[in-house]
């Protein structure tokens, strides 16, 4: 059943490097806080369970699996508080496949794994490109997951729109000097396809990078409607179905064919 309103939370999170268990524990705490603010979806950044340090992936303990007990604390928080929680992890599939993944833990216990499709640089040596995936269902809203550079490739959002996405949720790492890219990518994806866009950016710093912050929420007309600043923070925003419907109806009336879904 479709809800007229969806409250979402975006976590600008600075992970403890390499400590999956501790980062999962901290994520569970933020699930509870987001739920207290009414959120039904909580989005974390790229590799939020490990931090972005690819050299650490030589360690078997850095990889997360479907039955990983370290995820239990997040699963339970999501179930207890009715929040779909999307964490970022280096994912080891049962068949041995390796994905730079967004992992959605739903209140009903379902686990959906979406791998980064457009890998770049050293990521190509460690991960396989993710496959196209249907959007998640959250209170009747269709939420498409993207990982970092996916949002820079217009075709990725176009495919999500063709699958009926209402929300484009990007787990990312944008660094100092990329502030303009961080604003333009989600704004363009939102405006082109008349869907809300979310970006959860890593906070802090890692080997060779420092975050530019700027996590937030973008309206289907391209306006930014929430921003996290530069440090660790969770921002919450309410998405309105009427705004999506209004803009899509205007586009249809004016003969604009940017959205094909």
Image (spheres, rainbow, N blue to C red):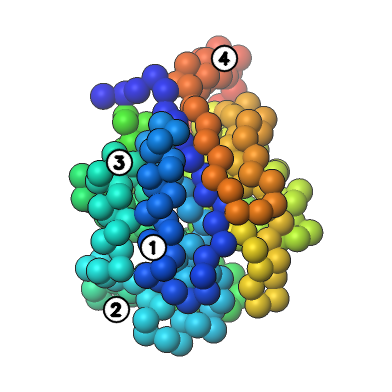
Distance between the alpha carbons at the discs numbered 1 and 2: 23 Å
Mark 2 vs mark 4: in front: 2
Identify which residue is drawn at 42% across, 86% down: 59
Q: Is residue 114 left or right of residue 118?
A: left
108 is higher (above) or lower (below) than 240: below
Decide: marks 2, 4 in contact (CB < 8 A)? no
219 is higher (above) or lower (below) than 93: above
Q: Which mark identifies residue 96?
A: 2
Lower position in the chain sequence, tag 1 or tag 2: 1
Distance between the alpha carbons at the discs numbered 3 and 4: 37 Å
- Density class for disc 2 (Cα within 10 Å; few <14, some 14-19, many ≥20) is few
- Density class for disc 4 (Cα within 10 Å; few <14, some 14-19, many ≥20) is few
Mark 3 vs mark 2: in front: 3
Between 179 and 133, which is closer to the camera in this rendering? 179
Label 2's element?
loop
Per the image, the residue denoted by label 1 is 24
């Amino acid at each position: 059943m479709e809800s007229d309103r969806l409250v979402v939370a975006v976590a600008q999170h600075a992970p403890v490097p390499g400590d999956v268990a501790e980062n999962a524990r901290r994520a569970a705490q933020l699930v509870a806080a987001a739920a207290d603010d009414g959120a039904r979806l909580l989005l974390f950044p790229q590799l939020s369970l490990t931090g972005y340090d690819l050299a650490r992936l030589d360690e078997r303990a850095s990889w997360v699996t479907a039955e990983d007990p370290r995820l239990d604390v997040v699963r339970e928080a999501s179930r207890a508080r009715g929040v779909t929680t999307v964490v970022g992890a280096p994912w080891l599939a049962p068949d041995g496949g390796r994905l730079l993944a967004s992992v959605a833990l739903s209140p009903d216990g379902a686990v959906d794994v979406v791998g980064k499709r457009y890998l770049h640089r050293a990521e190509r040596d460690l991960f396989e490109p993710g496959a196209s995936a249907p959007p998640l269902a959250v209170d009747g809203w269709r939420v498409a997951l993207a990982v970092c550079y996916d949002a820079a490739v217009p075709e990725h959002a176009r495919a999500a729109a063709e699958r009926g996405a209402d929300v484009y949720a990007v787990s990312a790492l944008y660094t100092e000097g990329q502030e303009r890219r961080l604003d333009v990518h989600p704004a363009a994806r939102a405006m082109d396809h008349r869907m809300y866009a979310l970006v959860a950016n890593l906070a802090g710093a890692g080997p060779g990078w420092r975050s530019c912050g700027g996590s937030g929420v973008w309206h289907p007309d391209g306006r930014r409607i929430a921003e996290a600043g530069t440090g660790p923070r969770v921002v919450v925003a309410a998405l309105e179905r009427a705004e999506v419907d209004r803009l899509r109806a205007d586009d249809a009336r004016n003969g604009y064919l940017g959205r094909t879904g």
